[in-house]
Image (spheres, rainbow, N blue to C red):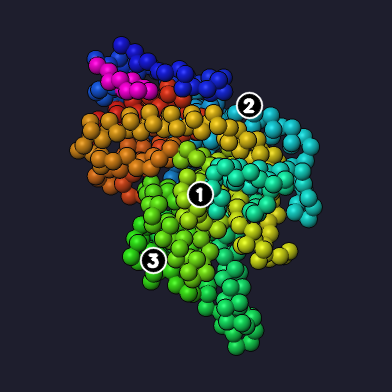
Amino acid sequence: MRRQVTTSLISAAVRGRQTARSLTRRAPYTRLLSTSQWTLPTSPSTKYSKPVYNLNASPEQSKVPKAPLLGVYARPEFVVSHGKGSYVWDTEGRKYLDFSAGIAVNSLGHADEGVLKVINEQASKIIHASNVYHNEWSPQLASLLVAVTQREGGLGFAPGHQSTNPPSGLQVFFSNSGTEANEGALKIARKVGKERWSLKHNKAWGAPGSECTKTGIVCFENAFHGRSMGALSVTTNPKYQAPFAPLLPGVSCGKLNDMEALSTLVTEDTCAVIVEPVQGEGGIHPAQTEWLIQLRKRCDEVGAVLIFDEIQCGLYRTGTLWAHSPLPVEAHPDMVTMAKPLANGYPIGAILLRDSIGSTMTPGTHGTTFGGSPLACAVGYHVLSRLSDPAMASQISDISSYLTQRLQLLTQWFPQHLQPTVRGRGLILGLGFKDTEAPGKVVGLARERGVFVLSAGKDVVRLVPSLNIGKEEVDLAVDVLEGALAAL
């Protein structure tokens, strides 16, 4: 018996996209459970009880070319050759469902025709112009980011705000990556802190005998903000930090959602607080709305700049433009950093910030050689225009609901391995495991069965597929997870 899908839920745009088909059809079920939108299985699939591919080649047997690359990545012994939609192929012709989207990057999948067209057209005109001069696309992408944020909610704007032309109230700085965006945000917050200290004490922060103390930065356990020295200093994982100490001074670390600690954690000497509304690399931990409201309030009390790192959870990953878009404005930040999905794999990052913060920065206080290039911004404009289509948000909501329901069944069928609750929302979801060794094993078992997933934190398998993923791909991914869990 085949399961049925409510085709009315799939928009014309989604029907029209070109994606590769699944590796194989799933095995039939003996019983089916109907819901209002989808039909769910009532028992695990046995289709993927055994591996599809043998990927256990030793380094000596590997066909991966030897190259003088710095050994900072532990990669499996095969080479990814090309991709299309949600699928990739290696040089041996093996096909995989990429349910990791290149670590939450390929929002529109691989080799998207619209993205390719923009890259080809813009590359034939100009790729790089430097920030000595204006270019055609950086102001257009900046204006679109501001307009969509004001329309859908974020950075102090409730949903439904109509932007001016040109948009005002928010500003944008373009970088080349999420780490660079976070570095820039921390740097801006430091300068704002000094200006606010000077105003409060009626003395210049750089004057002789004036020692500005408003330089502290607050971050949280299980955070990941990047690997450069500043971003690493607020990524409180000893595995990442210890080999590179000493790090940036003045950093304090708290616990996510710990309401009582805020008054002593965020002080008059704090210039910046940085937090992910949904922690990604650290294990898919959402920040509670009431806690974010109190964090915002505490930042206002002491004059600290609140930074939301939405590099992984932003740009519709949770189903809304920003993870904080549906929250009360009392929970909104002063700055948002972004990167991963903005140009569908072409390197770009950005800081979106309130005018009151951006006014502190003047020519020469920050900059970048490659950031905001015409090519990166042309691609970003195209991608954001498509992601902000209401049909896309509806598709994400529908497919997320189905994926979450299927994952929740796994927690019932494999209670010996899985924690009872699926973490996250939208299409940033996590399966928590009782054994901290299990996530890494499941990632490998899934790969042998033709599906890429990721681990996160100490105990989570992370699912961050392309945002235009279809039901067929969800079925394949979860069927493979069922086989991997059964093989543990």
Residue at image coords 57%, 42%: 160
Q: In whole angstroms, how far apart are the C-alphas of marks 3 and 2?
A: 48 Å
Q: Which residue is mark 1?
A: 310
Nearer the viewer's eye, disc 3 or disc 1? 3
Q: Which residue is mark 2?
A: 113
Q: Is residue 468 left or right of residue 423?
A: right
Element class at badge 1: loop
Report the disc number at residue 262: 3
Residue 233: in sight, yes or no?
A: no
Q: Position of residue 310 (x, y in %)?
A: 50, 49
Does residue 33 show up magenta in the picture?
Answer: yes
Q: Quadrant of residue 224?
A: bottom left
Range of magenta residues: 31-40
Q: In whole angstroms, how far apart are the C-alphas of marks 2 and 1?
A: 26 Å
* Residue type highlighted by circle 2: Glu
Residue at image coords 24%, 44%: 434
Q: Residues within 10 Å of mark 2 (few under 14, many from 20)?
A: some
Relative to residue 29, is residue 178 depicted above or below? below
